[in-house]
Image (tube, rainbow, N blue to C red):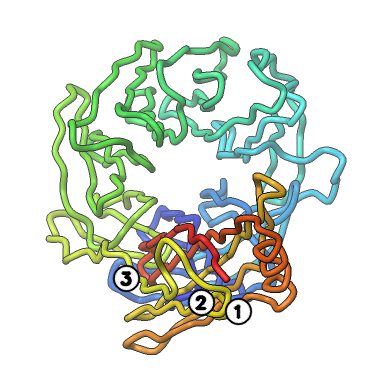
Amino acid sequence: MKVGSSLDDLIVGPDGGAWVFLDRRGASAVGRAEPDGRFRTTATSEYSVDGTLGPDGTAWYEIGPAQFLRADAADTLSTGGDLDFDHPLGSVFATGPDGMLWSPAEERNGMWHMAPDGRRLFVPVKFPKPCDTAVAFTDMITASDGVVWLSDRECGQLVRIGAAGTNTIDVDLGPEDLAADHSGGVWVSGSLEHSVLHVDAAGRVARFDLPSDRDFTDDVAVAPHDSAWFVLPDCRLLRVTPAGEMTTSPTPIHASQLGFDPSGGVWLAGEGALAHLAPGEPSGACDDRPPSIRVRPHGASTSLRRLRTVAITVREPAQIDATAYYFDGRSRYGTSGPTITRLVRTPHGATVRYRVSRRQLRRLARRLASGHKASVTMSVVAGDAEGNLNIDTFTMRVTR
C-alpha cells in the first residue's frame, strides 16, 4: 500500500483467493487477491466496520447495523441486509450451522439469523449475564461440529451455543480471537496475554505459555493439518500443536491477520501489505524498522522564538501526525493545539513544519512575563507504508 492508505479485514475464500477492504485517503475499495499474485480492486462508496466469509462463500463486509457489502471472486459488489435500525446485529457475526449468518442481539436475549438474501429470523437464546453493562463479545466462530463459540474478553469466558443449549467456560485470560480446530474445539488468543489456549469439544482447557521472549499474540488460524498459527508482533508466526509443541517462522510482512487456504497456503495481512506463502515457500525479508524522526527544536528547553515553527524531518515516505500540548501552570492537563497530518511520498523523505499559532505564543509570553513557568509537550508519530510506527513524545520548558 502507499503511505496514507491501509488495508484490513482479511477474508480467505473457499477457492484459495482472498479479499481485503482498502482505505485509500477518503476512497474505499474491495481488493481481491489470487495466490498467483494477481490483485484487483473495485471501488465503493461504503465504509466497512468488519468482515467475514458469508454463508454463500463470498466476502461480507458490514456497512450498517444490519447491512452488508458483498464481494464475489469475479469482483461483483452488491449490498444486502435489513434496514431495520431498531434491531441491529451484535458486535460479532459468523456463518452458523444452518447456513445463515448468525449474530447475537445487543440485548443478549437471542441470536439473529440472516439468510443470503437479507431476510432475518430472531431465535431466542439464554445468554449468561455479562459481568459489566458495557461488555461486548470480541469474536465468534462455528466449530467443526456445528457448535457456535463466542469470546467474552472482559468477563474472561467463552460462550458455547449448541443443540443442548448454552453454557460458559471460564478461562484465565481475556479471550479475543478464535479459530476452530478440526475436532469441535477452538484455539484462543488474547492480545495482552503471555499464553494461548486450546479448548476441546468437551470444554477442557489447555494453556500453553509463550516463549520468554514473546509477550503476546494477535490473530489465530488453524492449518489443514490442525496446528494453530498465531501472529507475533515481530514479523513472525508461532505454530502450536495440540500437544503444545511450539515453533516460530518468519513472515515477509508486518502482519496482524492471517488465514489458510484449502491447500495449506497462508495469507498474511498487515496495515500496509498483503502476502501469500504457498506450503513450504520460504519467506522474504520483513521490514519492521520504523521511520526515523528528527524534530527541531528538541531538548530540555526552547525559546518562544524557536517554538514558532517545529520542523519534523523523515528520511523515507511516511505519514506524520503531530500535536502540541501547552502548559501554563493553570491546568494540569494543559491546552491541546491542532493535530496536523501530512503525507511524505518523496523517496528520500522531507521536512514537515508544525506552526504554533500567534495566539498561543502570546498566551505563553504573558505567563512568562508574569513570572510563571510554561512548557510544551510535542507528540510526533511517523508511520511508513509497511505499518511501522515511530513515536517521539517530549516536553520542553519554554523560555522568553
Q: Are the residues flagged by discs 1 and 2 in contact, CB closer than 8 Å?
A: yes
Mark 1, other Cα within 10 Å: few <14 / some 14–19 / many ≥20: some
Which callout, 1 or 3, points to the residue nearer the camera? 1
Identify the mark nearer the N-term, 1 or 3. Answer: 3
According to the picture, the residue beneath numbered tag 2 turns out to be 310
**Residue at 60% over, 39% down:** 93
Residue 308 locus on image (x, y percent):
58, 79
Label ID, residue 355: 1
Q: Amino acid at mark 3?
A: Ser
Q: Quadrant of residue 372?
A: bottom right
Identify the mark nearer the N-term, 3 or 2. Answer: 3
Q: Amino acid at mark 1?
A: Arg
* Of residues 299 and 82, the one drawn nearer to the viewer in this rendering: 299
Residue 310 locus on image (x, y percent):
51, 77
Label ID, residue 292: 3
* Of residues 187 and 24, the one drawn nearer to the viewer in this rendering: 24
Give the CA separation, mark 3 to mark 2: 16 Å
**Residue at 48% over, 57% down:** 395
